[in-house]
């Protein structure tokens, strides 16, 4: 009888231990390079993405970087809504070409940034439809992607390349 009690206690302890181990985190921090969902949990350098969009895509106009004050006045994105950002706009204003990459402070502010960029695209469409109608198709094919706390905008003549770079 003593043996049965001891065996039951050992099995009960083993069951509890296994249950707790199953609920614990994994050593790889959930990183699985093969899955898109886990890629959004990884840290992304938005400055690097913006620079790659600028260097790997051909633009009709020269793109210039703007600072956080101009980001807010031109795009309507407040500086306190993102941790990191890099934005390029057309230097002459003759094209709607732009790159805007943001790491938002959280998912909620990422949605707000995405909304501001949608408004920017809409406003640019109305401007360029009358001003330079040959540039309007770039706005129709604008790449706007929100992935977790990251928001990317690329207005260029090569939306497929932009999507490829952004991932």
Image (cartoon, grey):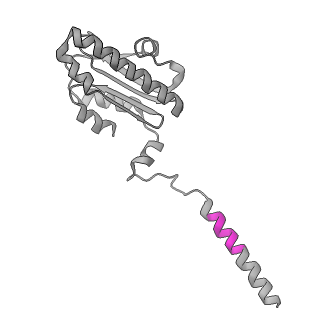
* Left or right, residue 45 beside residue 130: right
Q: Quadrant of residue 21?
A: bottom right
- Residue range highlighted in magenta: 13-21
Residue at point 43%, 27% (across, down): 114
Percent position (x, y) of residue 45?
42, 34
Secondary structure character of the magenta stretch overall: helix
For this rendering, which residue is in front, 49 or 124?
124
The reply to whether residue 107 is visible in this rendering is yes
Looking at the rendered image, the quarter that the C terminus falls into is top left
For this rendering, which residue is in front, 43 or 7?
7
Looking at the rendered image, the quarter that the N terminus falls into is bottom right
The reply to whether residue 91 is visible in this rendering is no
* Left or right, residue 167 beside residue 79: left
Residue at point 22%, 18% (across, down): 136
Percent position (x, y) of residue 86?
40, 24
Residue at point 78%, 83% (across, down): 6
Percent position (x, y) of residue 12?
72, 75
Extreme residue toward the right, this view = 2
- Asked if 82 appears above or below 76 in the picture, the reply is below
For this rendering, which residue is in front, 117 or 122?
122
Q: Quadrant of residue 16?
A: bottom right
- Asked if 30 appears above or below 100 in the picture, the reply is below
Say whether residue 127 is magenta.
no
Say whether residue 16 is magenta.
yes
- Asked if 70 appears above or below 35 in the picture, the reply is above
Percent position (x, y) of residue 62?
24, 16
Q: Quadrant of residue 88?
A: top left
């Amino acid at each position: 009888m003593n043996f049965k009690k001891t065996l039951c206690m050992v099995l009960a302890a083993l069951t509890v231990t296994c249950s707790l181990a199953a609920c614990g985190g994994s050593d790889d921090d959930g990183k699985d390079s093969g899955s898109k969902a886990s890629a959004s949990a990884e840290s992304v350098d938005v400055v690097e993405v913006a620079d790659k969009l600028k260097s790997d895509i051909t633009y009709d106009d020269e793109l210039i970087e703007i600072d956080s004050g101009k980001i807010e006045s031109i795009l309507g994105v407040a500086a306190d809504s993102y941790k990191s950002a890099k934005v390029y706009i057309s230097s002459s204003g003759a094209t709607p070409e732009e790159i805007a990459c943001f790491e938002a402070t959280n998912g909620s502010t990422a949605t707000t940034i995405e909304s501001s960029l949608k408004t920017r695209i809409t406003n640019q469409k109305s401007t360029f439809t009358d001003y330079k109608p040959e540039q309007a198709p770039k706005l129709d094919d604008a790449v706007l992607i929100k992935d977790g706390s990251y928001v990317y905008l690329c207005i260029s003549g090569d939306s497929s390349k932009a999507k490829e770079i952004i991932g």
